[in-house]
Amino acid sequence: MSKSMINIKAVKPSSETHNLRRRKYKHVYPELSQNNEHWVGQTISSMKKEVAAYCKTKSGRKMQKNATPIREAVVLIKPDTSLADLQSLAKELEDKFKIQCFQIHTHKDEGVSEDNLNLHAHMVFRWQDMETGKTLRLNKVQMAQMQTLVAEALGMERGQRKTNDVERLEPIEYKRKQEEIRLKELQEQYDFVEQKKNEVRARIKALTSEGGEPEEWVIRILTRERRSAADIGKLQSLTDEQLNQAIAWVRKRIDSASEKRS
């Protein structure tokens, strides 16, 4: 039996663009998008205005800037889960937890491959306490009850809470974050090498301005001209002390040659 899961977060500005497939995505297979179903009772922008106005009416104050009265749930579904099934689930959630669903989107076209799809639905809710006008608050017990309700309503096995963040409802998002971390590490390595290169060039420029010319191997390695893999490795391993020693060695050779010419 398929395991269920519902993961709820504040709605993103790009939600409708993603949910309605208004742009192309790397891990979405367009030929399968015909299997998706959509129900939009109200746009997110119009709901935000309605929520803000209701809060001002009920509490006499504007809603706080950091409030999240519009939230989006990602729900795991089965291949045969229909829009009607999710609308029925939305009704049960509203009856029990007072959250109003105003958009539902099923995604049966997204995943690692066409044979390994990430079947899920996006449900967008008005997360507002209708008595106070403020953002609705649900405790941990209620959130756990919501997980059970979702499993029962969709005829799925209740998923268990994970102790880490590796297995998520949206593995593509996790993969993207890992790629960002790797890119940052590579950028830091590149910046380090560039910094060393600039330091070396400055030292060589200062040396040659005195009329001397370093030995060819020093120029090749320190400026990375006509470089080989071994040269690059040597450049990365050079410390400030080693660079100073190399330049001092060249200076000594130049001074010695000058003395002989005189």
Image: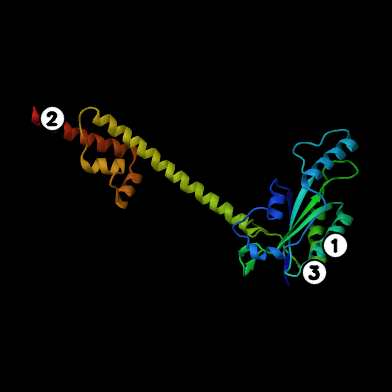
Tell me which amino acid carries mark 2: Ser
Residue 155 image-quadrant placement: bottom right
| Nearer mark to the viewer, of 3 and 1 | 1
The number of discs equals 3
User: In the rendering, which numbered label is found on residue 258?
Assistant: 2
Q: Quadrant of residue 76?
A: bottom right
Q: Indicate which disc, 2 or 1, sits on the residue closer to the N terminus.
A: 1
Q: Percent from the top left, x then y, of residue 244? A: 29, 35
Quadrant location, the N terminus: bottom right
Indicate whether 81 appears above or below 18.
below
Question: Would residue 8 be found to the left or right of residue 131 on screen?
Answer: left
| Identity of the residue drawn at 85% across and 52% down | 100
- The percent coordinates of residue 199 (x first, y second) are 35, 35
Q: Residue at x 39, y 40 (%)?
A: 194
In the picture as drawn, the residue positioned furthest to the bottom comes out as 1
Which amino acid, mark 1? Ser
Q: Which residue is identified by label 3?
A: 155
Q: Is residue 66 above or below residue 148?
A: above
Question: For this rendering, which residue is in front, 236 or 83?
Answer: 83
In the image, which is nearer the foreground, mark 2 or mark 1?
1
Give the SS element for disc 3: loop
Q: Position of residue 13 (x, y in %)?
A: 70, 45
Q: Is residue 236 above or below residue 256?
A: below
**Mark 1 highlights which residue?**
88
How far is mark 3 from mark 1, CA to CA?
12 Å
Answer yes or no: do the residues labelled 3 and 1 have beta carbons within 8 Å? no
> Foreground: 18 or 52?
18
